[in-house]
Image: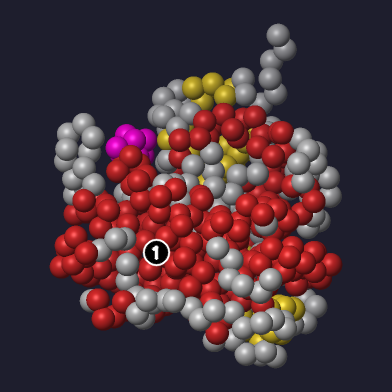
Amino acid sequence: MPELPAIRRAPRRLPLAGHAVPLLVQPLEFLKSLPALGDMVRVRMGPDDAYVPCDPALFRQILKDTRLYDKGGLFYDRGREAVGNGLVTSRWADHRRQRPLMQPSFDHRHIGHYAELMADETEALMRSWRSGEVVDVDKAMARLTLRITTRSLFSVPADHTLVAQVEKWLPILMDGFFRRMFVPARVLSLVPGKMNRQYPPPIAEMRKLTEEIIDEVRRKKDEDPGLLAGLMNARDETTGAPLGTQEIFDQVLILLIAGSETTATALAFTFHLLGAHPEIGARLREEVDGALGGRTPRFEDLSGLTFTRQVLMESLRLYPPAWMFTRSTTTACELGGHAFPEGTTFLLSPYILQHDPELFPRPERFDPDRWRPGAMSDVARRSVLPFGAGGRKCIGDQFALNEAMLAVAAIAGRWNLTPVGDRPIRPIARATLKTGPLPMRLQERPHEPVRNATTTDLRDQR
């Protein structure tokens, strides 16, 4: 058997910093250039090498074996420093115990209840809009998903201190966390100024606010239906032991961040794409009008909104919120014919696979019809991974997908959102992929008045 060629190293490496500069300055362009170097490419992240699988089969093999390819490397090591050992950041052994305790709160019994809350909060947002005004859709979607997350998962009202404080601290926390993924600590410590000063306060403030929510739920005892109450009441099937206070805290913080940040950016990109492609927006509105006739969408309506789902999936293909993450080997292993020692870091980027021209002809084109039955290969379909795959697939994937579809259908049914100016969007790759400021002009569509929102004012229950 011929010997495999050596794994090539990506260009543009600098002493000490490694590939931090291209990963910070032009990460998407840098990543898209790697497949030309082979099925596996070596990059320098911080003090160590990391390996980037550019072949779909190697990518899926890593995601499938969650015990061998555990959550580690700079992405998750730094993530645990920032937000604790929650479900998203924990290693295999902790995750194996944590997930069964949390899964009941995300099963189908709760989906209908969550969908009602999602619809109510989307209506509340739309009632604040005025025809003809310009809004920053990125900020509007961030506020919407934060309200949905806090209310659906943590049973706090939209005006709770947590909402305003997370809006203030979360962008700083996520940006600082991203920078620390690539820049070695010894280099970062030499950097003066605001980046080092701003990072610690949001961590401390977010932890303080989360502790206050935990105290509120304890005072309510059995009156609280939210996820946090479910976590506090959960018991290990084997030992009967509950989650410890620190474990509860870590789960709350990571779910708050993950539950709002990723769906918000997915919605912002979707409305940007619909505004930039008015013919596709018209098709979506035609479907929504036919299915809903101007009323608020319900959970039962989602199965009939097939083109709306195609639009959302194509948006997630083009702009995956979780555009990059890492895994670390727990033992020595072989992958793609190459031997790797224990502790090897793999950098996985869904963005690479989802922009592969061999899988997706004209990959930069926004084409929801790719998602018609039979329109793409099974390999291509399995390479679109907005929620991950395998045993570490996002526990809230259905929650997030329902939330996004309900928001898109409700807003598109009542509003036209058109871009202001013709400057092309440049995705901002940080801890998640973001649009940045996204000004769009609102134009209300003529419809019969919809029902009043039924958002419960939980202030009287506190």
Residue 260 image position (x, y, % from top left): 47, 64
Q: Taken as a whole, is the magenta stretch helix, strand or loop? A: helix
**Residue extent of the magenta highlight:** 91-97
In the picture, the quarter occupied by the C terminus is bottom left
At a point 84% along the width and 50% down the height, the residue shown is: 362
Say which of 215 and 81 sits in front: 215
* Residue occupying the point 54% across, 43% down: 388
Residue 242: image x %, image y %?
Answer: 18, 45
Judging from the image, what secondary structure is the residue with disc 1 in? helix
Circle 1 residue: 152
Residue drawn at (59%, 86%) of the image:
129
* Membership of 95 in magenta stretch: yes
Residue 433 visible in the shown view: no
In this rendering, the count of numbered labels is 1
Residue 70 placement, left or right of 249:
right
Check disc 1 and give the amino acid type.
Answer: Ser
